[in-house]
Image: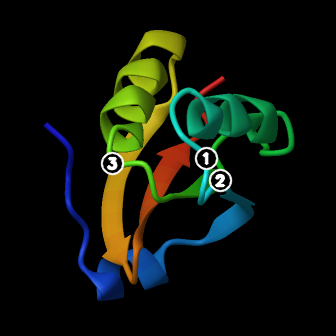
Amino acid sequence: MSTVLTDTDADQLTVSVVTDARGTACPGPLLEAKKAMGRVAMGEILELRSSDPQTKKDVEAWSGKVGHAFLGTAAAQGYDRIFIRRGK
């Protein structure tokens, strides 16, 4: 089950890369996350922004499968902020 972060918790994370996939539908946001992860150093955090509600579940499942840490999500105005720590 996804962890929901407060705005304060989300804003305290040190994000190294932000990828904006708002306006795209599944599997677009997941593909954007996979592509962006190549620009994130091991141990650093990717923030994915998505307006597709399915993205949270997809990214959480993908993160666990490939060895990244799914940190949670924070709701923003009309989209979700999804945080993933690169694990490998």
Quadrant in which residue 69 is drawn: top left
Contact between marks 1 and 2 (CB within 8 A): the answer is: yes
Going by the numbered disc 1, the residue's amino acid type is Thr
- How many marks can you see? 3
Quadrant in which residue 19 is drawn: bottom right
- Residue at the spot of label 2: 21
Circle 3 SS class:
loop
Task: Tell me the distance, in whole angstroms, between the alpha carbons under discs 1 and 2.
Answer: 6 Å
Query: What is the x, y in percent for residue 49?
Result: 56, 61
Task: Tell me the distance, in whole angstroms, between the alpha carbons under discs 2 and 3.
Answer: 12 Å
Is 29 located above or below residue 58 in the figure?
Answer: below
Contact between marks 3 and 1 (CB within 8 A): the answer is: no
Tell me which numbered mark, 2 or 3, is placed earlier along the sequence.
Answer: 2
Tell me which numbered mark, 3 or 1, is placed earlier along the sequence.
Answer: 1
Q: Between tags 1 and 2, which lies in front?
A: 1
Position of the N terminus by quadrant = top left
Is 25 located above or below residue 73 in the figure?
Answer: above
Q: Which mark is residue 24?
A: 1
Q: Residue at x 33, y 48 (%)?
A: 53
Between 23 and 65, the one lying in front of the other is 23
Q: Residue furthest left?
A: 1
Q: Is residue 45 left or right of residue 12?
A: right
